[in-house]
Amino acid sequence: MTKTILTLALLCAANLALAQPADAPKTYDENATAESLGLERYDAPIYPIFPWDHLGSWGDKYQPLEEGIKTMAENKCTVSAFVNDDRGIQAAKANGLKYIYEMGVETFDDRKLTEEEIQEKLAKIDAHIKDRVESTKDDPDAIGYCIQDEPGVYYFRALAAAVAAVKKYAPGKLAYINLFPGYASTIGADVDSQLGTYSYREYLERYVQEVKPQFLSYDNYMVEYSEDTRDISRGSIFFTDLFEVRDVALKYNLPFWFIGSSLCILGESSPPTPARCAYQMYCALAAGAEGLTWFLYYPLGWKESPIDENGKKTLTWQYTRDVNEQMFALGTYLRDYRSTECGMDAIYGDDSGLPKLPELPNNVLKNVSARFSNNTTNYETEPKLMIGEFAQKEGENVAALAVNLNFATSVKINFELPDGYKTCKVVNPIDGSESVASEEDLAGGFWIIPGHGKLFVFEK
């Protein structure tokens, strides 16, 4: 499987609208639910953090596979990159990592096939998966099977068969499929449509209703492509996709995983920074993401990857390691919570013509305010925040993850406690421990460094 990288020419042709065109045909049931579809939700045994690399194809290209998986564990990943043989499995186990096994299944575009040909191919998919899962289906370190990356709707019939086969022959394991971002081309763009739909929402809805997946995964590299949202038209797409995927995941009670950029995919991109790496993952976590992935670990012709052409760790490796450590601590903590609300300050004006994004919620962090310093008169722009709200699954606690959407300046926030709650705790992003915020802390406010976040928990 080859990762699809969208060029600038394609970005110009991309559909940026969230709504289905009025004259587009209805291709999915707007009233469908998780119950009516019989969906089976996948909950990982750990908080998944891993690099999006195919070790079977390029595992020894830059460093021995065993050394590569060892450095992934040192990078604070919890899952290795995709493996396809016993050598990769044993290396993952030796370093305490879970793994996703390469299925190598032959899916298909059904547009030019007869029904008889389709049925033959569906039978082959079922038989192939039955054979491939046999050696790993009972392995607790195998969390799932990699099926396909970035399929259009023309592949959904084949993928439905693959998901059903994994459920049947390896119960409890994940059928891993990653979806296109919303800037992939739609019907009506001046290219062969990648999504095969009129809108991104239609694509997501049809995927859930036709494939019946156990989770949603998608990639979006617009934080890099927009030069840290300085190009607002591109930067906004990072958020429109995030909220669209979140909305569909919540509608169908499915977890979603996010894939961000950990190198320079575009030739003109500036190098990754600590703020850029943190920004992508903190925003996804605030929106409720239950798994996080980086594209890529190895260079494969691109620049500034975590491991360079000589198999050496880079600054990007250190940046992603630091973020991974924080995501594991905070993501693990939030596994006891469910996402309830998420919103943000506008990153562009109302007259921009760009899609409107959800506003900051006001249920947990009440009457929140933010400032760059004690004197804001020297700044031309206002601080920007994203806030995700959470409720304890079994208990009465509520939580909020506040993210600083500024790339160069720290922000100090103040807020009032939610109604009926008396104690505020701050969760340590290194080890997940809690500390009670004092009255002095609450009065003075809390600093959040650029691109990072702070998790607050409230008790009655």
Image: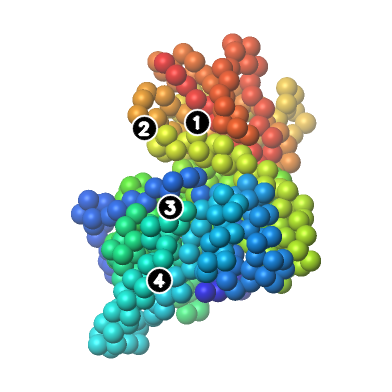
Quarter where residue 51 is shown: bottom right
| Residue ID for mark 3 | 140
Q: Helix, strand or loop at disc 2? A: loop
Quarter-of-image position of residue 431 = top right
Q: CA distance from mark 4 to mark 1?
A: 42 Å
| C-alpha span from label 4 to label 2 | 36 Å
Which element carries disc 3, helix, strand or loop? Answer: loop
Is mark 1 in CB contact (under 8 Å) with mark 3? no
- Using a 10 Å C-alpha cutoff, classify the residue at mark 3 as few (fewer than 14 neighbours), some (14 to 19) or many (20 or more): few
* Screen quadrant of the C terminus: top left
Q: To which residue does mark 2 refer?
A: 393
Question: Which residue is found at the position 52% from the left and 74% from the top?
Answer: 1
The figure's colour scheme reads: rainbow
The residue type indicated by label 4 comes to Arg
Q: Residue at x 30, y 53 (%)?
A: 40
Residue behind mark 4: 132
Q: Are marks 2 and 3 in contact (CB under 8 Å)?
A: no
